[in-house]
Amino acid sequence: MFNLSSAMGGRFAEIAVQMTETVLGLGPSPVRKTEARKPAAA
């Protein structure tokens, strides 16, 4: 969890990049199977 003030825009950007890298590093969700994905209903 991060606690930032509205004046900390630069720090917010750093944290957003860090969080994105962490999530991408985790890889695809083991819960969602790529083969089982159905096309979205129109």
Image (tube, rainbow, N blue to C red):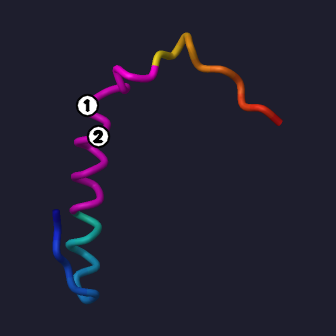
Q: How many marks?
A: 2
Taking 28 as reference, is 34 left or right?
right
Residues drawn in magenta: 15-32
Measured in 3D between alpha carbons, the distance from the residue under mark 2 to the one under mark 1, in whole angstroms, is 5 Å
Dot 2, how many residues are within 10 Å of its Cα: few (below 14), some (14-19), or many (20+)?
A: few
| Residue plotted at (72% across, 31% down) | 40
Circle 2: element type: helix
- Discs 2, 1 touching: Cβ within 8 Å: yes
Query: The N terminus appears in which quarter of the rendering?
Result: bottom left
- The residue furthest top is 35
- The residue furthest right is 42
Q: Which mark is residue 34?
A: none
Circle 1: element type: helix
Taking 3 as reference, is 39 left or right?
right
Determine which residue is flagged by label 1.
26
| Residue plotted at (55% across, 10% down) | 35
| Residue plotted at (22% across, 62% down) | 15
State the image coordinates of residue 41 (x, y, percent, origin top left).
78, 32
* Vertical relation: 17 (above or below) 40: below
Query: The C terminus appears in which quarter of the rendering?
Result: top right
**Kind of residue indicated by mark 1:** Leu
Taking 31 as reference, is 6 left or right?
left
Foreground pick, 31 / 10: 31
Dot 1, how many residues are within 10 Å of its Cα: few (below 14), some (14-19), or many (20+)?
A: few
| Residue plotted at (31% across, 36% down) | 24
State the image coordinates of residue 39 (x, y, percent, origin top left).
71, 24
Determine which residue is flagged by label 2.
23
Q: Is residue 27 magenta?
A: yes
In the picture, residue 16 is in which quadrant?
bottom left
Magenta part mainly helix, strand or loop?
helix
State the image coordinates of residue 20 (x, y, percent, origin top left).
31, 48
Foreground pick, 17 / 2: 2
